[in-house]
Amino acid sequence: MAAARRPLLAGNWKMNGLSTSIAELARIIEGFDAALSARVDLLVCPPATLIAAFAERAKGCKVAIGAQDCHFEAAGAFTGDLSAEMLRDAGASAVIAGHSERRAGHGESDLLVRAKAEAALRAGLLAIVCVGETKAEREAGRTLEVVGRQLAGSVPDQATPQGLVLAYEPVWAIGSGLTPTPADVIEVHAMLRAELARRFGEKARATRILYGGSVAPRNAAGLLKAAEVDGALVGGASLKASEFLSIAKVYLET
Ligand code: PEP
């Protein structure tokens, strides 16, 4: 990983957590000490119902709070949706766009993901744009083609390294306990960076590319220390402070 890119560990809590979960956030905050926060950025993305309370608890601490999705409009007649501006107002500083569970479960296209990422940039949120191939696509040897197409379609033209993070999340690795080899991850990340460089020039070098999919304490070192991997999007293991922090501690090892 290039020295200029500060690693990011983003925890995606998905549809998990009640008001009592603030105790788990407190454990994350307490464990994220000066040594860790000197090495890595930490972000927790709880369900939207908890963003305001989590942001209040995290105020003045090094742990940032994010959201898992947003609407692309700033306001209007969109029952049940939340805009990037609302999420920011609630205390979020980042939002995930195009997670595979939304692409698959809610039919989100690259075009829609791009509009959501644009909304995040408009509202001053860090957009974490997810891409990743299915098992069938990998087995058909189409990983680079699929992920490259998602990148081209989902990343806004006005993206900057400060405003956008990419997350490579093979769909088959999410929640399955399966992971690609570090070499497989490096191959995809190198392609993503080359594509970013082709489109955005030199500044692509500063854009963080995370790996996501069954990252856990047992496999974190191998995945996070791979070249071109600038951190992780972590699902299940981010729900427990001890596991999330033990993944972060990979960055204390030299
Ligand atoms: C995710 O939801 O983005 C994810 C990577 O989940 P998990 O770590 O549980 O595979």
Image (spheres, helix red, strand yellow):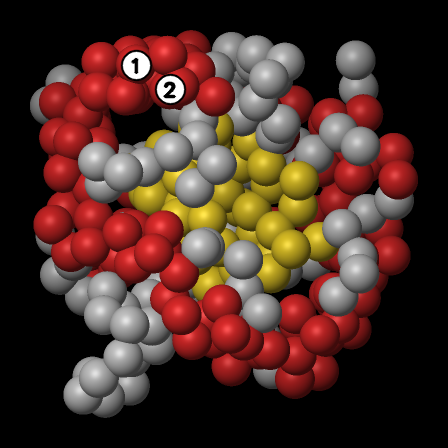
Quadrant showing the C terminus: top right
Residue 174 or residue 61, whichever sits in front: 61
Q: Secondary structure at mark 1?
A: helix
Q: Which residue does the image show at 37% across and 12% down from the upper left?
A: 202
Q: Is residue 69 left or right of residue 224?
A: left
Mark 1 = which residue?
201
Q: Is residue 166 visible?
A: no
Mark 2 = which residue?
204
Q: Which residue does the image show at 44% across and 55% down from the upper left?
A: 124
Circle count: 2
Give residue 59's position: percent from left, percent from top.
75, 66
Quadrant showing the N terminus: top right
Is residue 188 shown above or below 43? above
Location of residue 23 by image quarter = bottom right
Task: For label 1, count other residues whose C-alpha is less than 10 Å away and answer few (under 14), some (14-19) or many (20+).
Answer: few
Task: For label 2, count other residues whose C-alpha is less than 10 Å away and answer few (under 14), some (14-19) or many (20+).
Answer: some
Label 2 C-beta lies within 8 Å of the nearest ligand 1 atom: no
Q: Amino acid at mark 2?
A: Ala
Q: Amino acid at mark 1?
A: Gly
> Pointers 1 and 2 in contact (CB under 8 A)?
yes
Q: Secondary structure at mark 2?
A: helix
Give residue 238's position: percent from left, percent from top.
62, 53
Q: Which residue does the image show at 47% across and 28% down from the upper left?
A: 208
Q: Is residue 57 visible?
A: yes
Location of residue 58 by image quarter = bottom right
Q: Which residue does the image show at 75% across and 29% down from the upper left?
A: 39
